[in-house]
Structures are given as structure tokens and as C-alpha cells.
Image (cartoon, rainbow, N blue to C red):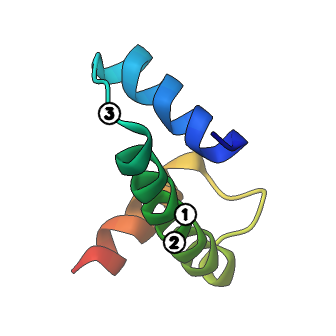
Amino acid sequence: MDDKTRLIAETAKQLQGLSYDEKRLAEIAAEVEILNAAVRKAAAARLTFDDDPAAFASVMAREAK
């Protein structure tokens, strides 16, 4: 199990109380990596380090529509 898959397994177990087999964990890790990259790309174009933290939620809400 690679580091990303292990992280997904730990997060699912600790935060959600869920367990998955290694194949599904690898699939989830790949999906999370894609989603994370999309969120970072969208945020980078619209946010700066000094923005109010609530601005991130606002950008994500706008982009989800």
C-alpha cells in the first residue's frame, strides 16, 4: 500500500469509521488526488494567502454551481 492509499485508509477509519479493501482505497486515493488538484487550481486563480479564510468557501460554492 503506497503512502496516499494508506492516508486514505487512515482518514476513512478515523473520521468516518469506514474500512475498505486495498483496491477500493487505491481508487479513492486516485479520485481524491484529481479533486484536490482541481480545487487547488481553482483556488490559486482566485485567492491569495492573505485572503479571509471564508473567501475559500465562497469560491468553492461559486465554482460548484
| Viewer-side label of 2, 1 | 2
Asked if the residues shown at circle 2 and circle 1 are in contact, with their CB atoms under 8 angstroms apart, the answer is yes
Front residue (pair 11, 50): 11
Quadrant (top left, top right, bottom left, bottom right) of the C terminus: bottom left
| Viewer-side label of 3, 1 | 3
Front residue (pair 61, 4): 4
User: Could you tell which of marks 3 and 1 lies nearer the N-terminus?
Assistant: 3
Q: Is residue 36 above or below residue 15?
A: below
Q: Which type of secondary structure does the marked residue at label 2 adopt?
A: helix
Residue found 35% across the figure and 79% down from its top: 63
Label annotation for residue 34:
2
Q: Is residue 60 above or below residue 18?
A: below
Task: Give, as a three-letter code, the residue at label 1.
Answer: Asn
Q: CA distance from mark 2 to mark 1?
A: 5 Å
Task: Give, as a three-letter code, the residue at label 3.
Answer: Tyr
Residue found 74% across the figure and 67% down from its top: 48
* Quadrant in which residue 46 is drawn: bottom right
Q: Is residue 5 above or below residue 52?
A: above
Judging by the rendered image, the residue that carries numbered circle 1 is 36
Residue found 77% across the figure and 56% down from its top: 50
Label annotation for residue 20:
3
Q: Which type of secondary structure does the marked residue at label 1 adopt?
A: helix
